[in-house]
Image: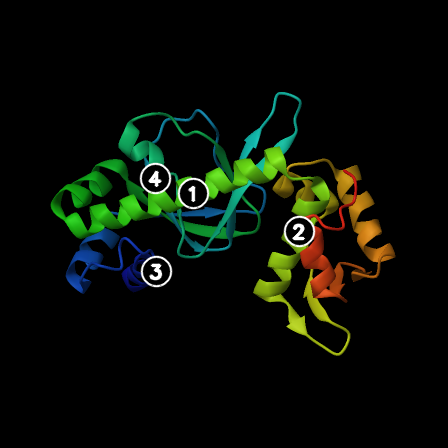
Amino acid sequence: MTSLDAIATLRRVPFFAVLGEEDLARLAGHCVVRSLRKDELLFAEGDRCEGMYVVQSGAIKIFKMADSGREQVLVIERAGSTVGELPVFDGGNLPASAAALEDSSLLFLPKREFLSLCRQNSEVAFAVIRSLAWRFRYMTSLVEELSLKEVSHRLARFLRDRALTVGVRTRRGVEFPLDETNQQIAAEIGTVRDLVSRNLRRLVDRKIIKMERRKVIVLNMADLEEQIAGSKRASG
């Protein structure tokens, strides 16, 4: 990766976008490229934090693993997103694990350089605060989803969000690929594979969605929204 590639990657990060070309180039000079294969671990929960990462390509899942082996995905970060910056500020260890969902490339920025930048540039520091505040709001919402909402609600929201972000409207409905296995979906929405399978079948039986191999067709978006609201809840 050239320095220009690194600069373009850093520019996509909201709290680095406030920097001029010269400062971005200087920052890029401190970055190290890290490449990961699919399913390769970036770091494990409890590891010492040496710096932060910026996703250049691919997808990184942040997750917690229970003693039982059950996995809960907290968030999936893609190009332009940062990973592992929180412990840079509080001095603690990494609070969750991170692994590649697909072949990925990241920039690693050492902690010392990141902290130095925040001390020298108040715009960057306040942008970082805004980013951390957004993450707090997101995690608060995630806790609500996992603790107060039923599996049917969470699965419907997962499908609705996927339809809105990558779906294509056709004569049949809104179509989108579903590359994740039921086990992977379960890890994302905080349940087990069997309940994902059961609730997918119920959505199919009610003619809210149709499934063709690993493609989903939302036949009735209004009914899917009602599942999210809980007015037509499936047990689970």
| Mark whose residue sits in front, 1 or 2 | 2
Mark-to-mark CA distance, 4 and 1: 16 Å
Residue 53: percent from the left, percent from the top?
Answer: 37, 45
Q: Earlier in the sequence, mark 4 or mark 2?
A: 4
Of residues 206 and 88, the one nearer the viewer is 206
On screen, residue 77 above or below 176: above
| Mark whose residue sits in front, 1 or 3 | 1
Residue on which the image places disc 4: 85
Q: Which mark is residue 220?
A: none
Mark 1 crowd level (few <14, some 14–19, many ≥20, 10 Å Cα): few
Q: Amino acid at mark 4?
A: Glu
Q: Residue at x 44, y 29 (%)?
A: 95
Residue 43: percent from the left, percent from the top?
Answer: 46, 34
- Left or right, 180 with respect to 25, comes to right
Q: Amino acid at mark 2?
A: Ile
Q: Earlier in the sequence, mark 3 or mark 4?
A: 3
On screen, residue 120 above or below 91: below
Residue 69: percent from the left, percent from the top?
Answer: 65, 26
Mark-to-mark CA distance, 3 and 4: 16 Å
Q: Residue at x 66, y 22 (%)?
A: 68
Q: Amino acid at mark 3?
A: Arg
Mark-to-mark CA distance, 3 and 2: 32 Å
Mark-to-mark CA distance, 1 and 2: 20 Å
- Left or right, 222 with respect to 66, comes to right
Residue at disc 3, secondary structure:
loop
Q: Residue at x 57, y 51 (%)?
A: 102
Residue 152's quadrant in the figure?
top right
Q: Earlier in the sequence, mark 3 or mark 2?
A: 3
Residue on which the image places disc 2: 228
Residue 172's quadrant in the figure?
bottom right
